[in-house]
Amino acid sequence: MQELIGQAKQTLVMSKDRFLRTFSFVPDDKLTWSPSPTAKSALQIAAHVGLSNQGMGGLISGQKFAFGSMEEMFRFMDGEEKKVQSRDEAVRLIEQGTNTALAALDTVTPERLAGDAGLPMPMPLSQFVMLLGAHVASHAAQIDYLQTTWGDRENHF
């Protein structure tokens, strides 16, 4: 169990660091730009990462899923993401959310790890804890893609 939790924590921190490094290269005038009306901006993606880490940390701690469906959660998240108005606010949210998730991982017992994550669909907590880092990394890749749309073709790893 400790190996899995350690791996989840290490992956989350590495992914968070990669996300923040990539996000730091988003020019201020591109923070709220998106390629289409339905696409998220870099700032919204960053807010999503912070909010998601907080929520996922809550589930890991055993909090009940607060929504009737994943779709309801995504609608709520869209609204919350739009409230974040600055790079500094997004970075603070990411750091806070990551700290919440890391602290939650420290509380996981073998019994809890053997149980369900508590989502509307079945998922073992042992699988869910590994999604933390993968989720953040996938959103870092979204920022990488957005950067190519305004001509930034450098790797910011």
Image: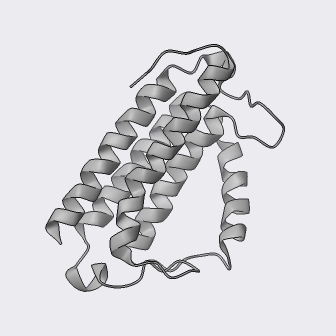
Protein image colouring: one colour
Drawn side of residue 60 relative to residue 119, left or right = left
User: For the view shown, which residue lies furthest in the left direction?
Assistant: 2
> Is residue 3 toward the left or the right of residue 21 in the image?
left
Front in this rendered view, residue 7 or 42: 7
* Vertical order, 36 against 54 (above or below): above
Q: Quadrant of residue 62?
A: bottom left
Q: Write the residue at 29% across / 60% down.
A: 103
Q: Is residue 12 above or below residue 6?
A: above
At a point 27% along the width and 54% down the height, the residue shown is 9
Closest to the observer: 87 or 34? 34
The residue sitting at 58% across, 44% down in the picture is 47
Count of labels in the image: 0
Q: Position of residue 43 (x, y in %)?
A: 62, 34
Regarding residue 61, the answer to whether it shows in the image is no
The picture places residue 59, in percent across and down from the top left corner, at 44, 72
Q: Position of residue 61 (x, y in %)?
A: 36, 73
In-front residue for pair 61/118: 118
Quadrant where the image shows the C terminus: top left
Image quadrant containing the N terminus: bottom left
Q: Farthest right residue?
A: 37
| Residue 45 x %, y % | 60, 41
Residue 36 visible, this orientation = yes
